[in-house]
Amino acid sequence: MIQIYKNHSVIWYSSLNFVHIAENAGLDLNWRREKFNVFGNCSANRGNQWQSIRQINDLKTSDGIFTFDNNTTAKNTRAQLRQTVRTGIDYFLNPKNTLGVVVNAYITNRLEGAIKGTTNITPVFNGVSYSVADNLQTKKEEGIQVNLNYQAVLNRPGQQLNFDLDYARFNSDPFQHNSNRYYGPDNVMKGDVEQLRNTNPQAIDVYSAKLDYTQPLWKNARMETGAKISRSKTDNDIKFEVFNDNLWKVDAGRTNRFIYTEQIDAGYINISQQIGKFSLQAGLRGEYTRTKGEQKTTGEVNDTTYFNLFPTFFASWQVSKQHNLGLSYSRRLNRPNYYNLNPFEVAIDAYSFIKGNPYLTPAYTHNVQLTHTYSKGLMTRIGYSITNGMFMQTPVEDAATQRFGMVFKNFGKSQNFTVMINYRRLLAKFWTANLTVQGAYASNTSNEASGEFVSKGGSVVVQLNNNLTVTPSLSAEVTGMYISGMRQGYFVFDPFGNISVGLRQMLLKNRLALSLTVNDIFLTYKMQATARYENVNNSLSVRNDSRYVNLTLRYSFGASTVKAARNKASGIEEEAGRAR
């Protein structure tokens, strides 16, 4: 089976006069013959991005309160071309044993972007009325993942063994050049242009070995067990320079090298049982983790070792043909991305920056849910979760440099009570609607230096999908989404939403598919939030290129009866996700 597709997008934002075109083309292949199945796909994506940011911070000093009002626009000055390849082969040793190899790889050209911003200061601060930032950024990325897998179907029906060996490497090479100009109330520039630049090459290596085994037990019962060992290493080497006396000089205070290593040894067991109208499943996963973060220049070392157990339980009861009840409990953890652990800062303008945190710890969540399904068209779910240490960007003030930043930190405790209703109905022969409404009440608490922080409030999320069959070969979809104001950690978010429409036309006996999508028609997908954290009052508004027109052409040829390749995940899906 072979598929060729091409995608063409136009993205615009009228008030900023941003218009850019994104293009995507690809090829999917699958060939099967006797003991071999060869598959692969490749794609090339070319496009630009833009972002508009407004940030207001209040600085409290002995001389009073100073307000910094920053407006920044970030956009690509050179389109990014991203090329990806996924290929593999399955070799069927015999009907019960399969050996496979899968390779995923990607590479980008050097993306170039410009960040331009103005910060107005009220009242005048240290003789400065406003500053202008003109920053340039470039970045190139590449990565490869290799998976070797073996699958054995054993003698007993349902008895199966899977073994995976994985390796991945991800590289990025960002560069940033910052130029800042400072002006007094008379609009005359004070001093010379301040210039800074930095390079921050990053390399991530991930290794993993995973074994999974499925064993039927007694009647309608099954056991799944397995083990996994993974090791990852990130190497970040940042070099900061300032332009002084017509020379670029190393800034020793911000130049550093950070190496982070992590090893996770895990094992699990799940047992499931069907008893009449009841389905039961219980599991336990154990993880032993060792991490080490080293800042080579400063000599700081953070060693952490911990062991955790993660139980799960699921139960369902088919009360009748139309009613089903379900109950579930799980404890899980969420590890920070490797980028979030990087302690180096990225400057936004003369007065603001973004920074990681090598002392971030995983967030732990207990989650309980009760569900009811009626006639497969109506589902209701009630849930409660409590998360300790969720990581989030936190507004901070750097008193030494009198700047503001967003730094990743662990938040104290967040409790959420949720009620969700999903209703799907055929309103007419040509019209199917799916409505999802979720209400939540959040309670966020954290112990800070200034005292206990408490934030409580409710929120509502509504999403409506409408699928319309205009003709046997032409279909349409209209989607609307609304999110009310909500509280998360230190932040209070304003309401936002969007409306999108799409058309799909099938041609040439359904071998050719032509799709047209208009996303966020009214450009209402805008994130706005305020935060009060210790001595910082922060207001943030971010708008991305969410409104676009997308045209996709997909053509399939070859034998449609060819059995598809195995849809097999690698053993490092989680680790690869943390590297992005």
Image (cartoon, helix red, strand yellow):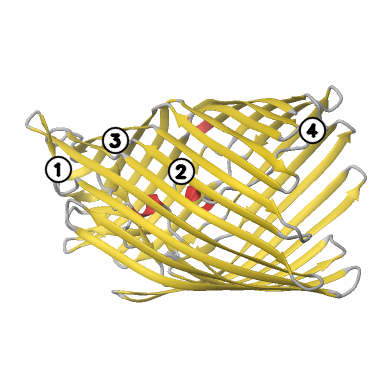
Check whether the beta carbons of the residues at disc 1 and disc 4 lie within 8 A of each other: no
Residue 379, horizontal then vertical, whole percent? 78, 65
- Residue on which the image places disc 2: 168
Residue 202, horizontal then vertical, whole percent? 33, 42
The picture quadrant where one finds residue 58 is bottom left
- Residue on which the image places disc 4: 562
Cα distance, mark 3 to mark 4?
50 Å
- Identity of the amino acid at label 3? Gln
- Identity of the amino acid at label 1? Asp
Check whether the beta carbons of the residues at disc 1 and disc 3 lie within 8 A of each other: no
Cα distance, mark 1 to mark 3?
14 Å
Cα distance, mark 3 to mark 2?
27 Å
Looking at the image, is mark 4 or mark 2 earlier in the sequence? 2
Check whether the beta carbons of the residues at disc 1 and disc 2 lie within 8 A of each other: no
Task: Using residue 365 as the reference point, say whether residue 395 is left or right of it.
Answer: left
- Residue on which the image places disc 1: 251
Looking at the image, is mark 3 or mark 2 earlier in the sequence? 2
Residue 2, horizontal then vertical, whole percent? 72, 26
Work out whether residue 391 or residue 150 is closer to the camera in this orientation and state it. 150
- Residue on which the image places disc 3: 176
Cα distance, mark 4 to mark 2?
31 Å
Let me know if residue 415 appears in the view: no
Q: Residues within 10 Å of mark 2 (few under 14, many from 20)?
A: many
Residue 474, horizontal then vertical, whole percent? 84, 31
Foreground label between 1 and 4: 4
